[in-house]
Image (spheres, rainbow, N blue to C red):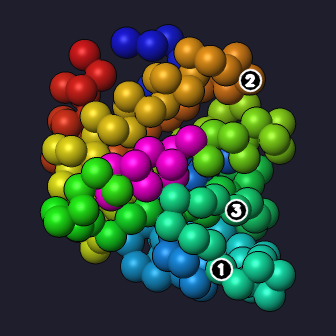
Amino acid sequence: MNERIRLVRGDITKIKVDVIVNAANSSLLGGGGVDGAIHRAGGPEILDDCRKIRAKQGGCATGEAVITTAGKLPAKKVIHTVGPIWSAADREQSEQLLASCYINSLKLAIKNELNTIAFPNISTGVYGFPKEQAAPIAIRTVIEFLSENDSIDEVIFVCFDEENFTLYSNALS
């Protein structure tokens, strides 16, 4: 396993890193799952920043990423990325968009001099991306990115549920 990658089972809102990634929706106004948990734990400052981004650029496109304050979270910042809604009919595009979420989040972390980053399992909840397909995409994308970039000291994959934790654990070994 890459010495700059760590896997933990737990709550991403409790992880002390420079930046956590939020699996957001394109409106950036909060939602369910990890998105709702991050907004609740971080407080209204996150939503205020999201509203400013919406006013400036009208939300966030699938595969893209934006950055806000972390409010009351132990992280310094939150990167919001919009994962793809799974489409078996357009599997290749879904996979490319998911990889883009990780790449664009990592690029934004580097641009903001944030060296430790924690990712949730993007798109595997209500967006329906099959967990057993999402895990290897996430891991492969991050490993390839880290092989070309020294700016990131550590990437933590934070799995809330046992199923994702097991899939990531197997994919990393």
At a point 83% along the width and 36% down the height, the residue shown is 113
Per the image, the residue denoted by label 1 is: 59
Say if the magenta span includes residue 99.
yes
Looking at the rendered structure, the secondary structure element under dot 2 is: loop
Which quarter of the rendered picture does the N terminus lie within?
top left
Q: Nearer the viewer, residue 164 or 96?
A: 96
Residue name at image x 51 percent, y 49 percent: 100
Residue at 38% of width from left, 39% of height from top?
Answer: 138
Which label's residue is closer to the chain start, 3 or 2?
3
Give the labeled residue for mark 3.
66
Q: Position of residue 118 (x, y in %)?
A: 54, 42
User: Which residue is drawn at the image coordinates 34% and 56% (left, top)?
Assistant: 93
**The C terminus lies in which quarter of the figure?**
top left
Q: Are marks 3 and 2 in contact (CB under 8 Å)?
A: no
Q: CA distance from mark 3 to mark 1?
A: 9 Å
What amino acid is found at the position of numbered circle 1 in the picture? Gly
Q: Which mark is residue 151?
A: 2
Within 10 Å of disc 2 (Cα), the crowding (few <14, some 14-19, many 20+) is: some
> Spatial distance from mark 3 to mark 2, Cα to Cα?
19 Å
Q: Nearer the viewer, residue 97 or 3?
A: 97
Q: How many marks?
A: 3
Can residue 73 be seen here? The reply is no
By secondary structure, the bulk of the magenta-drawn segment is best described as helix
The stretch drawn in magenta includes residue 4: no
Report the amino acid beneath label 3.
Val
Judged left or right of residue 74, residue 170 is left
Residues in magenta? 94-103
